[in-house]
Image (tube, coloured by chain):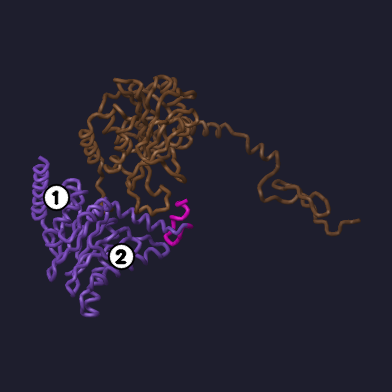
Amino acid sequence: MASRYDRAITVFSPDGHLFQVEYAQEAVKKGSTAVGIRGANIVVLGVEKKSVAKLQDERTVRKICALDDHVCMAFAGLTADARVVINRARVECQSHKLTVEDPVTVEYITRFIATLKQKYTQSNGRRPFGISALIVGFDDDGIPRLYQTDPSGTYHAWKANAIGRSAKTVREFLEKNYTEDAIASDNEAIKLAIKALLEVVQSGGKNIELAVIRRNQALKMFSAKEVELHVTEIEKEKEEAEKKKSKKSV
Amino acid sequence: MRSSGAPELCPAGPGAAMAATFFGEVVKAPCRAGTEDEEEEDEGRRETPEDRDVRQQLARKREVRLLRRQTKTSLEVSLLEKYPCSKFIIAIGNNAVAFLSSFVMNSGVWEEVGCAKLWNEWCRTTDTIHLSSTEAFCVFYHLKSNPSVFLCQCSCYVAEDQQYQWLEKVFGSCPRKNMQITILTCRHVTDYKTSESTGSLPSPFLKALKTQNFKDPVCCPLLEQPNIVHDLPAAVLSYCQVWKIPAILYLCYTDVMKLDLITVEAFKPILSTRSLKGLVKNIPQSTELLKKLMTTNEIQSNIYT
């Protein structure tokens, strides 16, 4: 039944599905996991690094990109589609700054990206963008924001979310572990992001990339060493928690 | 009375049909539906020797052959007529094959008893005679310690016209009823018809479909209507249903059709069923083997990040 209504983007199926958009969401699942967390004073983006070929320049394989000084995004899905969307968003950020003399709000640029994506779901001859994005940043009012967009062009604000492969598992972990205590301090929020990723990343800390934005500060990408430090801290805490458990049961 | 409005009688020629007019005359009217002339049809239907040759060549090309790989000789009778069988596990597709390779074949000594060689449009080679050992094959094994337990690793696509041949060469025309068949295969989750959106499905997930004579407990939910099974798994199940052989198909719906660790691990509930009882020994070692299999098969791709 699906095959009769899934060739053209502009055709609804009898039960109301836009199959091309749903298939675009499958393309997103082929990208590696990305997780975003909104803390009290910090926003964190964590991604599973893709294994880079031996001769490939690692610097050019990036999942986290800055859109402006105060906004950055992580994506999952088709690399080329992401590049196009990011370029358009970056231009829009600067154009906005020049026109109204104010930096974009996180919600504005998210809406821009979502509108762009939606246009491609209603246009003849074009296919939807095969990416989902997590957009984080601080507005002028100092409030941290996290938004998620998907290929259909919808966007929502989230306290914490994950996209890409195994996003469901990570989201379930976040639902259980995202508490006011867990995001009370910056460090705790960062550790929550890493813990969420460790649920699904296959080789531990060395495959995780992290970026944070703190209020009134620029985007900071963590080096591999810094990530390792946090991972070791998490593992220590786990061990101590297990020791305590075994002591209690003895 | 003279019929005043009678149409002209057109000359009868090839492609003409008979038509009755209002006045009862029979007129030959040109027929766009093609020739209805009996003579013409016979001529067209008669097969030239070249046509017959081509048809026979095509049939030979698409023949399913069962042979012993070492000796390259064909098996004279069907596989299960030659060897007695109590249990037959068939893996169709690369993820199912990887599951059996790591969990079942690793836990015992399996001896190859034959392989099915076949060619169709899905094969990546045009050479039908010299399929190399790295080509997708259907390989049959039996357990050395219990030769009535069989295993089939099928990683090639068996086309519709070849499925019946495959069944005949493997099961024979009058199969025994006291064996149990287990089939494992994968399907893309977008083929799964449900009222929910595919985004909310917990893929990969396992569904089962069994024949009437299969009485053992099933480790996962049964496949609901209107979902159907396709290709070789459907052919085997239909065959077993008709011949009243107890058989069960475990179908894994996944969103990754290439070789994938999470998809293969979705088959794990089957390890506790009676179908695989006694055939799986070392699970941690099998998981390690599976991981190795994944990394060796990984192709670098920059399309998705």
Same subunit, tags 2 and 1: yes
Q: Main secondary structure of the magenta part?
A: loop
Q: Residues within 10 Å of mark 2 (few under 14, many from 20)?
A: many
Query: Relative to residue B80, is residue B191 depicted above or below?
Result: below
Q: Is residue B167 left or right of residue A170?
A: right
Query: Relative to residue A245, is residue A95 depicted above or below?
Result: below
Query: Relative to residue B283, is residue A147 depicted above or below?
Result: below
Q: Residues within 10 Å of mark 1 (few under 14, many from 20)?
A: many
Residue A8 sits inside the magenta stretch: yes
Chain that is coloured brown in the picture: B
| Residue under label 2 | A155
Q: Is residue B298 left or right of residue B168?
A: left
Query: Relative to residue B54, is residue A88 depicted above or below?
Result: below
* Disc on res. A205: 1
Residue A35, horizontal then vertical, whole percent:
22, 57
- Is A155 or B133 nearer to us in this picture? A155
Q: Is residue A44 left or right of residue B108?
A: left
Is residue B114 visible from the viewing direction of this image? yes
In magenta, the rendered stretch is A1-14
Residue B176, horizontal then vertical, whole percent:
45, 22
